[in-house]
Amino acid sequence: MMQANPPLRAMPRLIALAMIALGFTACQSSDRSASSAGQTGGTVVFAIPTNIETLLPPAQVNITTAQILDLVFDYLADVGDSLNMLGDHGFTPRLADRWTWSPDSLSIAYHIDPRARWHDGVPVRAADVKFTYKLYTDPAMGSGIASNLARIDSVTTPDSLTATVWFKQRYPTQFFDAATQMRILPAHVLASIPVASIRSSEAASHPIGSGRFRFVRWTPNQSVEVVADTANYRGRPLLDRLVWDIAPDYQSALVKLYTGEADMYEVIHPDDVPEVAKHAGLRTIVYPQPAYSFLGFNMKRPLFAEAGVRRAITLSLDRTSMVRNILDTLGVVAKGPFSRLNHISDTTVAQVPYDTAAADRLLDSLGWKRAKDGMRARGGRKLAFQVLVPSSSKYRVRMASLIQDQLQRVGIAATPSVLENSVTLSQIHGHDFDTFIGSWISDLSPNDPKQTWTTGAEKEGLNYFSYSDPKFDAAIDSGLLDLDPARSKAHFSHAYQIIVADEPGVWLYEPQLVAAVSARIHTAPFRPDGWWIKVPQWYIPAGERTARDRVGLAAAR
């Protein structure tokens, strides 16, 4: 049960050292796959405190769904371990085994690997790429990725194995957008379904992909299961099965881990590290995540349309102390709508300081006066709002309580509204909230701010807060189109200055994450853009397998 007003205090500094003593390992040192030859078989169960909303790639929103879809479906190419987003350097083949740029760089011809098959045995063809682009960009689909594809003009198919992507103009991330923004979809399965009803179709809950794992079953509110595609054109994964075991909340997911019902929990709160250390069968992995969390204001609410109120809230929050309280050394204060891991970030952006005296003066000047109880009101209306937060995130639930505590000191009543994840999603999609503590996870491309905070992203993206500033939009577009890296970054820096000054939200923290994993599982290095990307390389030595590891492919199906 969440406490209404926990005291604001830092976690003991010793915990940073204790993490080493308790068996934390860096993500780079977690690679034990060198001796994996012949080690096929086994099951990994992931405990997740969040529900699955769909298994249709264009409709995917939450990160857990992304994990499943990235393993069941394929992109044309993968960004590779270098995480380079510019040009095509470092990208590795997926469905496309090779590609050719046109002399004017306005088109890329992707050659489809002739060995690639959908999980129902039908060959993957260029027509699937053309269909995928059409579906992702169809307004009736309403995909959050559509805005990232706005500079692609069309896709043509000169032959059955060649998909040519045509661009409206040259820009730095052309290849990234064409090759990695869309999970390629089976036209023979989806093309006959009206787009308006595709989200509710059977295909949206029983996906047929071309990835190294194939879908088996989805039991709503309980689990999703996939198995190895043993005939996959890129080779079978080492594990037989993956299961995402859905728990109602964070604590329930932890219990599944401790009792052995689950093998991994991807985000352990620092407070729980000592308990994890008591379980000899578990180990911890610290890894980076390109994410930032924020308190977003619904700008359609009259209260938050008032710039002075937004500024007063920001002035009233001691973000440094809050981040230390919740994350200790595993997080830093966010500087804007970006992750420091992204090459377009700028941590020198001027920040709004913590200054409660200034907040008091500002609120007084706006007519929000304190009553006898210390809380503020204007014209008979209390200065009060709700803070929507998903129950699945322990970090954000605690942050909501700290925000409540700090704002109360300046006479603002901010009440946490902690709801199950599916209800939270429903409310933010419907703009039915006052404020929301969100956490956006970046793919490390420059497209992120366009997809999340520009005016166009309100209809085709993740701008649920209705923030709109033409100057910000223009600066983002300039950054995306400028082929000179230095000038491009300068445009993004200008955009960040604009949005930080506009204050559609309070930028809270960027986390380092801690995963707890069964010691019997040999993992590959966790990539910053997705710890799950190298799951096909994970294995469980035959001598360390449990009963569920021996279920086998046939029984799983």
Image (cartoon, rainbow, N blue to C red):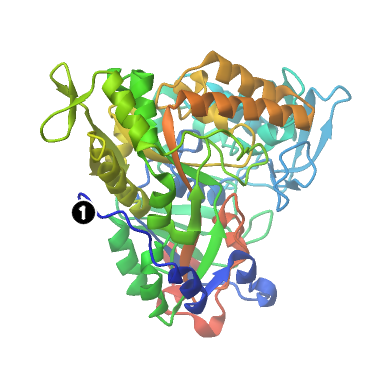
From this view, report whether residue 342 is shown above or below residue 435.
below
Which residue, given by chain and number where applicable, does mark 1 sit on?
3
Q: Position of residue 463 (x, y in %)?
A: 45, 27
Q: What is the crowding at mark 1: few (fewer than 14 residues within 10 Å), some, or many (at least 20)?
A: few
The three-letter code of the residue at mark 1 reads Gln
Residue that sits furthest to the left in the current view: 372
The C terminus, quarter of image: bottom left
Residue nearest the viewer, comparing 285 with 295: 295
- Of residue 393 and residue 429, the one placed in the foreground of this image is 393
Q: SS class of the residue under badge 1?
A: loop
The image quadrant that residue 384 belongs to is: top left
Is 153 placed left or right of 549 in the picture?
Answer: right
For the N terminus, which image quadrant? Answer: bottom left
Q: Residue at x 75, y 45 (%)?
A: 91
Q: Is residue 344 left or right of residue 105?
A: left
Question: Residue 200's x, y, as percent?
Answer: 36, 32
Give the total number of marks visible in the rendering.
Answer: 1
**Percent position (x, y) of residue 361?**
32, 26
Q: Is residue 30 visible?
A: yes
- Residue 412 found in image quarter: top left
Q: Residue at x 73, y 21 (%)?
A: 167
Q: Residue 118, located in which quarter of the rendered image?
A: top right
Q: Is residue 298 visible?
A: no
* Residue at image coords 57%, 16%: 471
> Which residue is most to the bottom?
543
